[in-house]
Image (cartoon, rainbow, N blue to C red):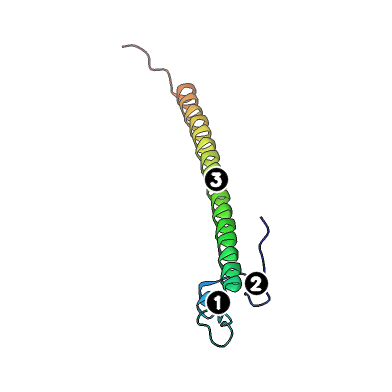
Amino acid sequence: MTVYRSRHALTGPLTPDRIAALDLPHTRFGRRGYQPEHVQALLCRLAHELHEQSRQLDLVRAENHRIKDALRTWHTQWARLAHGRSRSTLTTTEPDIPDA
């Protein structure tokens, strides 16, 4: 999707403060409101940037999930290995107690 960038639209990343401070050009004398092409360009750009931010957030969440799963797997394997070592050292270091 190509984003139409008017010379009156914001440049750089959009932030809530920059959007709130935006001053769109008014229509010519005798008409009220804003020029529809400028409003449409801004709406298109907002939609595009929000879509991109949502996509990036989804990627971050997926990566976070992957890292947590890998950490859980590693921790489980480490715990099993450590538990196995402690059991084997207990059985080999215990003295034999003669039957009375």
Cα separation, mark 3 vs mark 2, equals 27 Å
User: The residue tagged with tag 1: helix, strand or loop?
Assistant: helix
Q: Residue at x 56, y 51 (%)?
A: 60
51 or 69: nearer the eye?
51
User: The residue tagged with tag 3: helix, strand or loop?
Assistant: helix
Instruction: Estimate the x, y position of residue 88 in percent, counting from the top left.
Output: 49, 24
Mark 1 is surrounded, within 10 Å at the Cα level, by few (under 14), some (14 to 19) or many (20 or more) other residues, namely few
73 or 36: nearer the eye?
36
Cα separation, mark 2 vs mark 1, equals 10 Å
The residue labelled by disc 2 is 12
Q: Is residue 50 above or below residue 77?
A: below
Q: Is residue 73 above or below residue 97?
A: below
Give amino acid for label 1: Arg
Dot placed on the residue nearer the N-terminal end, 2 or 1: 2
The residue labelled by disc 3 is 62
Question: Is the residue under label 1 in contact with that under label 2 (CB below 8 Å)?
Answer: yes
Instruction: Estimate the x, y position of residue 66 in percent, counting from the top left.
Output: 55, 42
Q: Residue at x 57, y 46 (%)?
A: 63
Dot placed on the residue nearer the N-terminal end, 1 or 3: 1
- Front: mark 1 or 3: 1
Which residue sits furthest front? 30
Q: Is residue 85 above or below residue 23?
A: above
Give amino acid for label 3: Ala
Mark 3 is surrounded, within 10 Å at the Cα level, by few (under 14), some (14 to 19) or many (20 or more) other residues, namely few
Tell me the number on the disc at residue 18: 1
72 or 62: nearer the eye?
62
Q: Quadrant of the N terminus?
A: bottom right
